[in-house]
Amino acid sequence: MSMIAEPVSAKIDGQAPTRTTTSPWITALSLVIAVLALVAAGTGLFWSGGEAAYSFTSLHGEEVELLGEGIYRNDSAFKGAGNQGADALILALAVPALLVSTLFYSRGSVRGGLVLLGVLCYLLYVYVSLATGTAYNELFLLYIALFSAGFFAFVLLIQELWGRVELFSTVGLPRHALSVFLLVCAALPAYVWLEPIVRSLGSGEPPALLDHNTTLVTEALDVALIVPANLLAAALVWRRNPRGYLLAWVMLAFLVLISMGVALQTAFQVSAGVDFAPGEIYGPITGFLTVGAVAMYFVVRLLRGAALHPGPVR
């Protein structure tokens, strides 16, 4: 907690310390997101409607086991249980982190603003995925509201922080190691998602993870946004661009939360009876938690290197 609780002030050009201004819109939107996310994640995790799992024939003629229970009853067991794992992480970690970071941000804390930005990125990703890739359910309008509020809060906050070219003091911050790690974080999802798609194009068979869906939402988001963002951050950090460290921060904080989410999602999927080989359980969990641990190391380094004053806008 101490790493985000510093007062944000500085002596610039010989003047008395000044306090960073914060946007009431960002604070208000963040509080709205916290309330709506509590409702959405709580409903997703504890809704008890529906019946037992049942089979569904997809558009490609494949038999898919649907969850059959809860708010995600019309999603596949793999996807529905995975959504419940994300709900558990949102309730246990993301919403509390959102509230605490919003409090410190509203008091002018740069580090509070950085943590808030990372949490907003994760929640935006989750609710874009739910609004566009989950079978229609009673929370659809709530997903849209979270998508919209998360998008505008994230854009306003990253615009506010982007203008502070001295947000990070690059002295002492890792450059080569962080750039290489970001390149790895771009290459891994690009390969994992593109390889089965390219293979399916050659074989004429639908990708294995398509399940009951008509398209691949997660793959589209990751390849279109997450991969390029990691590549851009790697290039900017390599060139010692302070804004590169801000973009790297967003990707690293997102990765820390995603890595924990994958572990929880896998646990919920196993509990729902999804058939995994042992390697399909321990391999991804170990891999994601390892990558998440490395990302956490860089997160701590960047938080410690965050400047305690706003830089000039250029």
Image (tube, rainbow, N blue to C red):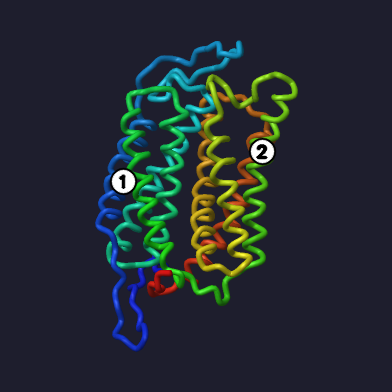
Q: Judge whether 243 appears above or below 14 on screen.
A: above
Badge 2: residue crowd in 10 Å (few <14, some 14–19, many ≥20): few
Q: Judge whether 300 appears above or below 253 on screen.
A: below
Question: On the image, numbered disc 1 is attached to which residue?
Answer: 34
Q: Which amino acid does label 2 sit on?
A: Val
Compare residues 89 and 199 and report the one nearer the observer: 199
Residue 71: x and y in percent read 38, 25
Residue drawn at the location 61% of the way across and 27% of the way down = 209
Residue drawn at the location 41% of the way across and 58% of the way down = 115
Q: Which mark is residue 15?
A: none
Residue drawn at the location 58% of the way across and 62% of the way down = 236
Q: Residue extending furthest front?
A: 314
State left or right for residue 85 relative to residue 207: left
Q: What residue type is labelled 1?
A: Ala
Could you tell me how far apart the alpha carbons at marks 2 and 1 are, in whole angstroms?
A: 32 Å
Can you tell which quarter of the image residue 127 is in? top left
Residue 266 appears in view: no
Q: Element at badge 2?
A: helix
Q: Element at badge 1?
A: helix
Closest to the camera, between mark 2 and mark 1, is 2
The quarter of the image holding the C terminus is: bottom left
Residue drawn at the location 53% of the way across and 21% of the way down = 214
Question: On the image, numbered disc 2 is attached to which residue?
Answer: 192
Residue 173 appears in view: yes
The quarter of the image holding the N terminus is: bottom left
Residue 28: x and y in percent read 25, 51
Q: Judge whether 183 appears above or below 1 on screen.
A: above
Badge 1: residue crowd in 10 Å (few <14, some 14–19, many ≥20): many
- Label tally: 2
Can you tell which quarter of the image residue 46 is in? top left
Q: Residue extending furthest bottom?
A: 14
